[in-house]
Structure formats: structure tokens, C-alpha cells
Amino acid sequence: DMGMYQCVAGNKHGEVYSNAELRVIAVAPDFSQNQLKSQTLVKVGGDALIECKPKMSPWGVVSWRKGSDPLRESNR
């Protein structure tokens, strides 16, 4: 929960206080800072890495599709 919080530590010699503010960040998924490359060239038999790094909070689900077909883990 967002708000100002205070920690109080004390013993027979006195008390000390410390304050902190908790802010909760909520951000819808956004690709504006990490766009996917429109094209990736790979040699036959080579490896391809297509990074998907959307900005979002809290972290959500990322899935891949080719057209309307979902992609699944495979050796390809």
C-alpha cells in the first residue's frame, strides 16, 4: 500500500525514527523504448535471437505468435 511509513527503534537509552515513502508503480505494457527489429537475418543452421523487452509493471505474460498461431518451445 502506498504511503509514508515510519520505523521506530528504541531501548532504555532512547528512541530513533526513520521515515520512508512507498510508491507503487503501475505501467501498462509499452514497446516505445524497446522496439523489436522489423527484420532479422540469420544464416541457414544459425541461431536467431529476437529480444522482447516490454516495459510494464507489474511484470506480465509475454507470448510469441506467428500470424495467429502461438509459438511453442522447440529446437527450432
Image (cartoon, grey):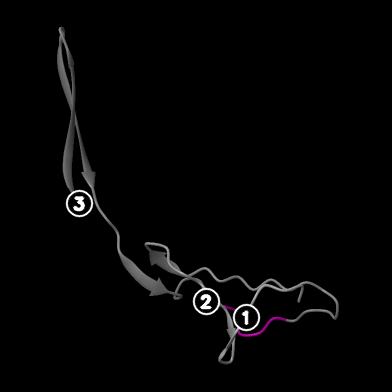
Element assignment for label 1:
loop
* Nearest-to-viewer mark from 1 and 3: 1
Span shown in magenta: 36-40
> Magenta region's main secondary structure?
loop
Disc nearer the start of the sequence (3/2):
3
- Give the residue number, with chain letter if any, for mark 1: 71
* Front-lying residue, 62 or 52: 62
- Dot 1: few (<14), some (14–19), or many (≥20) neighbours within 10 Å? few
Q: Mark number for residue 2?
A: 3
Q: Position of residue 63 (x, y in %)?
A: 53, 75
Structural distance between the alpha carbons of marks 1 and 3: 38 Å
Q: Mark number for residue 35?
A: 2
Element assignment for label 2:
loop
Quadrant assignment, res 45: bottom right
Structural distance between the alpha carbons of marks 1 and 2: 20 Å
Q: Position of residue 31 (x, y in %)?
A: 46, 75
Is residue 30 shown left or right of residue 64?
left
Residue at 17%, 39% in the rendered image: 5
Q: Amino acid at mark 1?
A: Leu
Magenta highlight on residue 11? no
Which corner quadrant holds the C terminus? bottom right
Is there CB contact under 8 Å for labels 3 and 2?
A: no
Asked if residue 58 is positioned above or below residue 7 in the image, the reply reads: below
Residue at 17%, 21% in the rendered image: 16
